[in-house]
Image (spheres, rainbow, N blue to C red):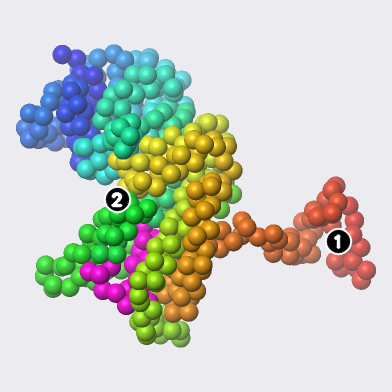
Amino acid sequence: AAAQIGVTGLAVMGRNLARNFARRGYAVAVHNRTPARTRELVDEFGGEGTFVPTETAADCVRALARPRCLVVMVKAGEATDRVVEEFAALLDEGDVIVDGGNAHFEDTRRREQQLRERGIHFVGTGISGGEEGALHGPSIMPGGSAESYRALGPMLESIAAAAPDGSPCVTHVGPDGAGHFVKMVHNGIEYADMQLIGEAYDLLRHAGGLEPAQIAEVFADWNRGRLNSYLIGITAEVLAHRDADTGLPFVDVVLDQAEQKGTGRWTVKLALDLGVPVNGIAEAVFARATSGHADLRRAARDLPGPRPDATAVGGAEFTRDIEQALYAAKIVAYAQGFHQIATGSADYRWHVDQGRVAAIWRAGCIIRADFLDRIRAAFDAHPDLPALLVDDTFAKALGQAQQPWRRVVATAAQRGIPAPGLSAALAYYDSLRADRLPAALVQSQRDYFGAHTYHRTDRDGVFHTRWAEPQRPEERAD
Ligand code: 2AM
């Protein structure tokens, strides 16, 4: 029988995705550069469904029913280019190549355009949820042509995670690179969420005087409330875990240097180009970078400042304050991510439905949470919501969090506990709220040294002041 879908690149993500298709009843052609991996997959998991092992790319293409749908799961970058080209040469008009790797969306745009000229659909697809997600149901973010989704959509819908309301966590995000773009921002938000959770832990420990096992209970408790999410859940588990060798809390034996593969950095780089303020996400990326500068940290260790742990603030009230601050900063981080999606969507003319994006992040992906359903509801109620923060539900939560959030940031500053995510989010929030920003002074400075001109609050037009002259006369510059 002809296979309905093919998967090439059978490392753990590709293998699990192939198994997921097979378990859902699809006949899956499987292929890998090194054929031993293909044989291993079939030997080990062949009983789970119908696999069609293939040795060469040509064999793989021959095994597929038309229009052929092939999922490429190889390393992003050159390997993807090479594999896509190898298969594209064997495919016909109307066939579909899915790139399920973590490609940069600009690469996806380039590949999509090149293949479109040859009549082949190229579908850059974000897949989130790690190895387990790939096997049991990821959140899937396909881009590419709407036409490609007709062949592909039903198959993706059947392997995707199901949201609490039963709907599959996949949608046609938009044309060309939209899927990989949205996946990139997903990862940026993930960085911010993880950083905020890290700061909450740090404050509970060093200002609150709690031990990791106690903080595990706090997180487990939060996980039963509005913060309920995959990340909060695994945080509780990690904090409860003790190292087998030393008996110490696991978190205390792990070197405090957080690494990154690049999608968070991409998010921030692109935000800079788009002019979207994502300071919460940026602080999370920089916090990882800061942690990795061991020499810098060693050199700075003896700089003056308060030492944490002096006296515990402690108490249930402080824990409640942190929960409020965490929730408020989380709203800000997600709002920034969605602002970036809206801006990218407008710039690239993708028409991304932000409510749909929130909906497909409700399950399967790393940032899955009840919270995403609140975001979905906000966009469903007001598709043109100018900022997530002003949605009634979120505005109310931010209102309630005001004083606790400010107390937490103040406590962090007073005690010398770094909280870049929580405080950047607050600064962003207050910047948006401000009647007047010191941007007026900055623009004045620009006019002073660079004749960059300014607008006035009281009159239309463009103005420049001749600062070098004693009378500092103002002239129109337009
Ligand atoms: P391999 O098993 O032959 O190494 C993750 O590295 C996956 O991408 C693996 O399945 C790997 O195949 C595949 N891969 C990496 N680089 C590749 C390339 N240049 N061509 C084909 N497959 C590649």
**Between tags 2 and 1, which lies in front?**
2
N-term mark: 2 or 1: 2
Per the image, label 2 sits on a secondary structure element best described as: helix
- Residue pictured at 39% horizontal, 83% vertical: 307
Residue 209 seen anywhere in this rendered image of the structure: yes
Q: Amino acid at mark 2?
A: Tyr
> Mark 2 packing: few (<14 Cα in 10 Å), some, or many (20+)?
some
Q: Amino acid at mark 1?
A: Thr
- Residue pictured at 17% horizontal, 32% vertical: 19
Residue 109 seen anywhere in this rendered image of the structure: no
Per the image, label 1 sits on a secondary structure element best described as: strand
Quadrant where the N terminus lies?
A: top left
Asked if residue 88 lies left or right of residue 407, the reply is: left
- The picture quadrant where one finds residue 102 is top left
Asked if residue 106 lies left or right of residue 60, the reply is: right
> Mark 1 packing: few (<14 Cα in 10 Å), some, or many (20+)?
many
- The picture quadrant where one finds residue 78 is top left
Q: Residue beneath label 1, please?
A: 465
- Residue pictured at 29% horizontal, 18% vertical: 68
Q: Position of residue 5 (x, y in %)?
A: 24, 22
Asked if 249 appears above or below 90 in the picture, the reply is below
Q: Position of residue 384 (x, y in %)?
A: 57, 37
In the rendered image, residue 208 lying in the magenta stretch gets the answer yes
- Residue pictured at 26% horizontal, 30% vertical: 159
Asked if residue 440 lies left or right of residue 71, the reply is: right
Q: CA distance from mark 2 to mark 1?
A: 56 Å
Which residues are drawn in magenta? 194-216
In the rendered image, residue 13 lying in the magenta stretch gets the answer no
Observer-nearest of 266 and 189: 189
Give me the disc on residue 230.
2
